[in-house]
Image (cartoon, rainbow, N blue to C red):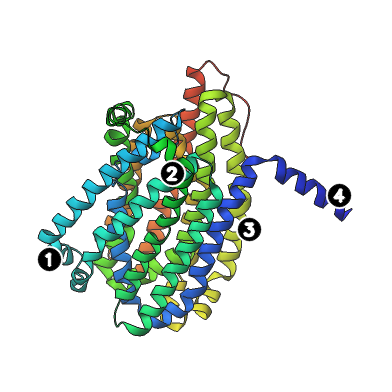
Amino acid sequence: MLLQIKAKLHAKFTQDRFLKNVTVLVGGNIAAQMIVICASPLLTRLYTPDEFGYLGLFISLLALLASISSLQYESTITLPKDDLDGANIVLLCFVTLLGVVLLTAGSLLIFTEQIAELFQVEAIKNYLFLLPISLLALGGNNILNSWATRKKNYGLISTTKITQGINMTLVQVIGGMVIKGPLGLMIGDVIGRAGGNARFIRSTYREDWQIFKQIKWKKIMKMAKRYKKFPIYSSPATLFRQVSLELPFLVLTGIYGPSIGGGFILVQRVLGLPLFLIGLSIGNVYLSDASKLVHINPDQIKKLFWSTFQKLFIIIAPLLFIIIIFGPTMFTFIFGNDWTISSSYLPILAIMYSFQFLSAPLGVTLYVLERNDLQILREIIRVVLIGGALILAYIFSYTPFQAIIAISVAGSIGFILYGIFSIVAIHQYLQQQGIPVKGETPI
C-alpha cells in the first residue's frame, strides 16, 4: 500500500511541471530562510532591539528605492515571445538602474541630515553611504533573477538564494562580534544581496551570451516604447505598494522609537520575509507559466490561477494555526527575554502575512494581462488603508500593541483586495477574448 502511494506521489511530481518548479524554488528559499532564522537567536543576543531598528530603517529606504530602480521594466523580461526581446529589456533595466543609483548617491550627499531628522534617528546618517551600493546589488539581482525566471533556470535561482542567506548570516554574526553597533547587520545585508549576482552573471554568460551579443540600441528603445505602460503606471503602483509595506515600520519607529521598530522588524525577519520569499518563488513560476499561456492557451489562465491559490492555501493554513497557538511562547524562548514584547506582535501580524502569502504571488496576474490601471488603483487603496490605520493610531494615542492590530487589519483587507483585483482582471480578459468565464472556483 505504501509503495503504491509512493509511486502515485512520484508520478504526480514528475508529471506536474508546475509543482516540480515550485518545489525547486520554494526548497531553495526555505533553506535560505532557515539559515537566517537559525542564526536569529544568536543575532538577537549580539545586537539590541535599537540596532535592529536601525537595520530596519536602512532596509525600508532600500526597498523603497529598489521598487523603482528599473522603472518596473524588469517585470516585462518574461513577457516577450522572443528571447532576444527579453535580452534587450535586460540591458534597458541595467541602464535605468545605474541612473537611479547615481541619482541616489547624489541625493544622499545633500539630504543625509534631513533623512536622520525626519525619522528622529540621528545615528542612521553614519550608515547611509551603504545605500547606493546595496541598491545596485539588489536591483541587479532582481533583473538577473527575472532573466533566469524567463529561462526557467529555477535551480540557479534556488542555489543563489541559499548562497545569499549564508553570506548575509556569516557577515552579520562576525560583525556583531567584532564591530560595535548596527554596522555589522548592514554590511551583512549588503554582502548577502550582492553575493548571488556573480552566479547569475556566470550562468547568463555561459548559456545565453549568443543572445546578448545580438542586442541593438534601436531594439532596446523599441522595447522601452512597447512596454511604456510599466514605467508610467506599474512603477508608481509598485512604489505605492512598497510605501504601504514600509509605512508601518517607519511610522512605528517615528512614534515609538527604534526599539519598537526593531521588534517589528524581527517578526518580519523570522515570519513575514520568509513567507514573502516563498510566496515570491511560487509567484515566479506562476508568472512564467501565465506569460506563456497568454500567447498559446489563454483560456487556461483562470485554471492556473485557482490551482496556484489552492497550493498556497494548503501551505499557509496549518502554519497559521501553529503560529497563533504556540508562536508567542516559542518566540520568547528562542530570541530571549529582551524580545518578549515583540512576541505579542507575532500572532497579530501572522494573519496579515498569511493574506499576503495567498494574494501577492497571484498579484502578478495584472503584469501578465498588462492591467497597469488596476495595479496602480489597488496600491493606492492599500496605502490609504495602512495610512488611515496609522493616522488613527497617532490621533488616539494607541499603544504599540493597538497600533500593530490596526496595521494588521488594514493590511489584511488590502491583500484581500489584491486577490479580488486579479480575479476581475482575468474575467475581463477572458470576456475580451470571447472565452466563457464560468468554471474553476477556489477551494
The local crowd at label 1, few if under 14, some if 14 to 19, many if 20 or more residues have their Cα within 10 Å, is: some
Separation of marks 3 and 2 at Cα, in angstroms: 31 Å
Residue 156 spot, x, y in % from top left: 52, 52
Name the residue at 29% across, 53% down: 64
Residue under pointer 2: 146
- Distance of mark 2 from mark 1, alpha carbons? 36 Å
Query: Mark 4, mark 1: which one is toward the viewer?
Result: 4
Q: Is residue 247 visible?
A: no
Amino acid carrying mark 1 in the image = Glu
The three-letter code of the residue at mark 4 reads: Gln
Quickly name the residue at label 1: 113
Question: In the shown orientation, is residue 116 left or right of residue 207?
Answer: left
Looking at the image, is 406 positioned above or below residue 306?
Answer: below
Mark 3 or mark 2: name the one nearer the start of the chain. Answer: 2
Between the residue at mark 3 and the residue at mark 1, the CA separation in whole angstroms equals 46 Å
Ranked by sequence position, the earlier of labels 4 and 1 is 4
